[in-house]
Structure formats: C-alpha cells, structure tokens
Amino acid sequence: MVRLGADGIATTVRTIPDPDAPDLLAVLRLDGNRRVTRTDRDLAAAVFRRHTNRRPFLERLVAPVARVALKSGRAS
C-alpha cells in the first residue's frame, strides 16, 4: 500500500477473515489514481530503512495470565 500510494495509486484493504479461504490475510483493491504527498514519498523511502527487533525486552517471561489475555484479544 505504501509503495502504491507513493506511485499515485489509490488502494483499499479488506482484512476481514474469509471462512472459505483460511490462508487469506487480506484483499488489496486498486482504486485508480491519487495525488501523491510528501508524506507518501517519505513513508515509501522509510520502508527500506526499517528493521524488526525480535529480541526480548525483559529478562523475565510474560506471566501466563497475560499471555492468555493477549491471545484472546482482551489485553488492555
């Protein structure tokens, strides 16, 4: 979406699960042209500079009750 937006292409994403296609994560629809902003260009450039840190933040495990809440979507 970010790259398409920086190229002036409008998009819509639908992330609602499809019971008939359990491996489908999202549907991306191209919606024609759009005006490109400075923010669009900046975001597209930032994609290549980003990185993911998957290391633990703390030296201790997450409490079991917190893990259950996170998995169920009830964590606040």
Image: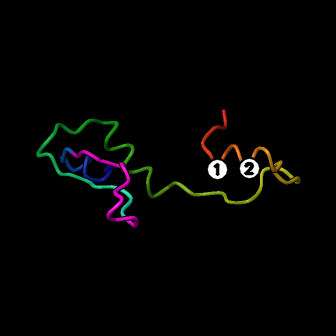
The secondary element bearing badge 1 is classed as helix
Q: Which quadrant is the C terminus positioned in?
A: top right
Question: Along the horizontal axis of the image, is 27 left or right of 17?
Answer: left
Q: Report x, y in % for residue 35.
A: 17, 37
Residue count near mark 1 (Cα–Cα under 10 Å), binned few <14, some 14–19, many ≥20: few
- Tell me, yes or no, whether the two marked residues, 2 and 1, touch with CB atoms within 8 Å: yes
Q: Residue furthest front?
A: 19
| Vertical placement of residue 37 versus 6, above or below | above
Q: Name the secondary structure under disc 2.
A: helix
Disc 2: which residue: 67
Q: Amino acid at mark 1?
A: Lys
Residue at 43% x, 54% y is: 47
Identify the colour scheme used: rainbow
Task: Judge whether residue 20 is colored magenta.
Answer: yes
Region of the chain picked out in magenta, as a range: 11-23
The residue positioned 60% from the left and 57% from the top of the image is: 52
Callout 2 environment at 10 Å: few (<14), some (14 to 19), or many (20+)? Answer: few
Q: Nearer the viewer, residue 66 or 36?
A: 66
Which one is nearer the viewer's eye here, 37 or 58?
58
What residue would you read off at disc 1?
Answer: 71
Q: Residue 39 — which label?
A: none
Residue 11 in picture, x, y percent from top left? 23, 46
The relative height of residue 61 versus residue 35 in the rendered view (above or below) is: below
- Residue 5 colored magenta? no
Residue 8 vertical position relative to residue 54 in the rendered view, above or below: above
- Left or right: 60 with respect to 6? right
Residue 43 percent across, percent down from the top left: 39, 44
| Three-letter code for the amino acid on which mark 2 is drawn | Arg
**Can you name the residue that lies furthest to the top here?**
76
The chief SS type of the magenta part is loop
Question: Residue 66: x percent and y percent?
Answer: 76, 44
